[in-house]
Image: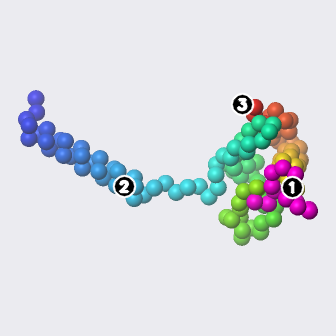
Amino acid sequence: MFSRQELKLVYGAVACLLLIAVVSYAAFPVKAPRQPNRIAFQSIAGKVMFSHDRHLSASGYNLLCDECHHTLAPAEFDQAGSCAACHPAGDGGGEGTVNRADAFHKQCVDCHLGYDRGPVDCAQCHMMQ
């Protein structure tokens, strides 16, 4: 068995290592991604999951930001915000503004049909829970 002094030494070393781990974790947090990896859009027809990774990556659809965020110049891509900022829910936000559901359906379905990739039927996107 271990002597009392050896146990104190081991417990002290473990406590020091634990303290170093906690301080390191707090001092060097993981940076948040530039855009969310996945977004869940709530709708009356069911939740729709959207993956930025799938749409932007070369192994996915390999799209550029402005293909969806159509009002941004390339220098503004890092400022891309929520679709809700321009496209309100419901009946729309004013003259010439397309509501969110119509904007999503036109943008997403037209793109999926144009590239012949991705879901186009209601139940392929909208998940009832």
Its colouring scheme is rainbow
- The residue carrying pointer 1 sits among few (fewer than 14), some (14 to 19) or many (20 or more) residues within 10 Å by Cα, namely some
At label 2, counting other C-alpha atoms closer than 10 Å, the crowd grade (few under 14, some 14-19, many 20 or more) is few
Res 59 visible: no
- Where, by quadrant of the figure, is residue 69 drawn? bottom right
Proximity of marks 2 and 3: CB atoms separated by less than 8 Å? no
Residue 101 located left or right of residue 81: right
Which numbered disc, 1 or 2, marks the residue closer to the eye? 1
Residue at 18%, 46% (x, y): give it. Answer: 12
- Reading the image, the residue beneath label 1 is 92
Residue drawn at 34 percent across, 50 percent down: 21
Q: State the residue position of label 2.
A: 24
Q: Nearer the viewer, residue 63 or 77?
A: 77
**Bounds of the magenta span?**
85-97
Q: Which amino acid does label 2 sit on?
A: Ser
Looking at numbered disc 1 in the image, what kind of residue is underneath it?
Gly
Of the residues under marks 3 and 1, which one precedes in the sequence? 1
Q: Give the Cα separation between the discs numbered 3 and 1.
A: 26 Å
What main secondary structure does the magenta stretch of the protein show? loop
Q: Residue at (35%, 51%) from the top-left corner?
A: 22
Question: What residue is pinned by disc 3?
Answer: 129
On the image, the x and y values in percent for residue 107 come to 85, 51
The amino acid sitting under disc 3 is Gln
Which mark sits nearer the N-terminus, 2 or 3? 2
Q: Where is residue 7 in the image (x, y as percent from the top left)?
A: 14, 38
Between marks 2 and 3, how big is the CA–CA gap? 41 Å
Q: Front-most of 63 and 86? A: 86
- Given residues 95 and 107, the one toward you in this image is 95
Q: Is residue 105 visible?
A: yes
